[in-house]
Amino acid sequence: MTLANQRLDVPVTIDESLCIEGCTLCVDICPLDSLAISDETGKAYMHVDECWYCGPCADRCPADAVTVNIPYLLR
């Protein structure tokens, strides 16, 4: 059995294996400042569990590392 590499209980997940170190495009475009860059890895992560599910962070990511987990009731 394989383990999940991403948390699915947060609105936005970032695949660290795809995330480009030092890239801040998703962080810069988030209207709520929900994303941040880790001091340890240099990669993006969601530091607050608040999201409007607007999607520009995922659209702007050049590596397709960002996924917006839209709840079933909002789809």
Image (cartoon, grey):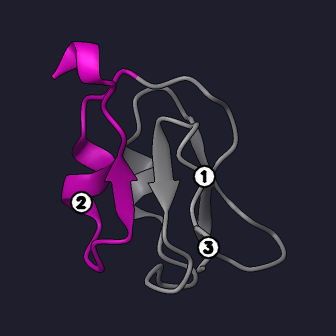
Please identify the quarter of the rendering in which residue 54 is found: top left
In-image side of 38 versus 69 (left or right) = right
Q: CA distance from mark 1 to mark 3?
A: 16 Å
User: Would you say residue 58 sits in the magenta stretch?
Assistant: yes
Residue located at (40% from left, 29% from top): 31
Measured from the top left, where is residue 55 in percent x and y?
24, 40
In-image side of 50 versus 64 (left or right) = right
How dense is the environment of label 1, judged by Cα within 10 Å: few (below 14), some, or many (20 and up)? few
Which of the two discs, 2 and 3, labels the residue nearer the N terminus?
3
Q: Residue furthest front?
A: 1
How dense is the environment of label 2, judged by Cα within 10 Å: few (below 14), some, or many (20 and up)? some
Check whether the beta carbons of the residues at disc 1 and disc 2 lie within 8 A of each other: no
Please identify the quarter of the rendering in which residue 59 is found: bottom left
User: Would you say residue 12 sits in the magenta stretch?
Assistant: no
The residue carrying mark 3 is 43
User: Label 3's element?
Assistant: loop
Instruction: Between residue 5 and residue 25, name the one nearer to us.
Output: 5
Magenta stretch: give its range.
Answer: 52-75
Q: Amino acid at mark 2?
A: Arg
In the displayed structure, 68 sits above or below 49; it is below
Which numbered tag is attached to residue 7?
Answer: 1
Measured from the top left, where is residue 61 in percent x and y?
29, 66
Residue located at (24% from left, 44% from top): 56
User: Label 1's element?
Assistant: loop
Which numbered tag is attached to residue 60?
Answer: 2
In-image side of 67 versus 32 (left or right) = left
